[in-house]
Image: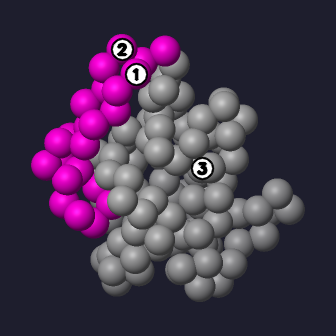
Amino acid sequence: MSNRAINSSGLSYAQACLVERPSKLLFISGQVPADAEGKVPERFEDQCRLVWRNIEAQLIAAGMKLTDLVKVTVFLSDRQYRAANAAVRKEVLGTHAPALTIIITGIYDEEWLLEIEAIAAA
């Protein structure tokens, strides 16, 4: 299977991601910044890292990895988190560049500052 970024931004996302002949697809529901005990960190950066760990746990459970991500949708509770979100995403994904959409919106739980859903292909 081939997974290729098209018009990569250099900021850990691309305008498009081409997947040719995948053998499996994984649709990851919105992951939230709560740990297994339901605890939510206060700082945005800590919440963001926890969400990415939760995404990675779903990928691992499916026998996949972060580089299999082809589409990510980030829901932010406020525009003020744009830069921190980009920095943590770059820290987590490095040079991997899935297609990306960021939406500023109300989040289900007021304690959560973001939620991320994703699609992976391998």
Are circles 2 and 3 on residues that touch, CB within 8 Å? no
What's the magenta region?
Answer: 1-23
| Residue 73 image offset from top left, x and y in percent | 38, 49
Please tell me the numbered disc located at residue 32: none
Image quadrant where residue 103 sits: bottom left
Disc 2 residue crowd, few under 14, some 14–19, many 20+, Cα 10 Å: few
Are circles 2 and 1 on residues that touch, CB within 8 Å? yes
**Disc 1 residue type?**
Met
Query: Residue 89 vs residue 17: left or right?
Result: right
Q: Earlier in the sequence, mark 2 or mark 3?
A: 2
Q: Earlier in the sequence, mark 2 or mark 1?
A: 1
Q: Main secondary structure of the magenta part?
A: strand
Q: Tell us which disc is closer to us: 1 or 3.
A: 1
The quarter of the rendered structure image containing the N terminus is top left
Q: Is 18 placed above or below 106 here?
A: above
Let me know if residue 106 appears in the view: no
- State how far apart marks 2 and 3 are (Cα): 23 Å
Front-lying residue, 55 or 113 = 55
Disc 3 residue crowd, few under 14, some 14–19, many 20+, Cα 10 Å: many
Element assignment for label 2: loop
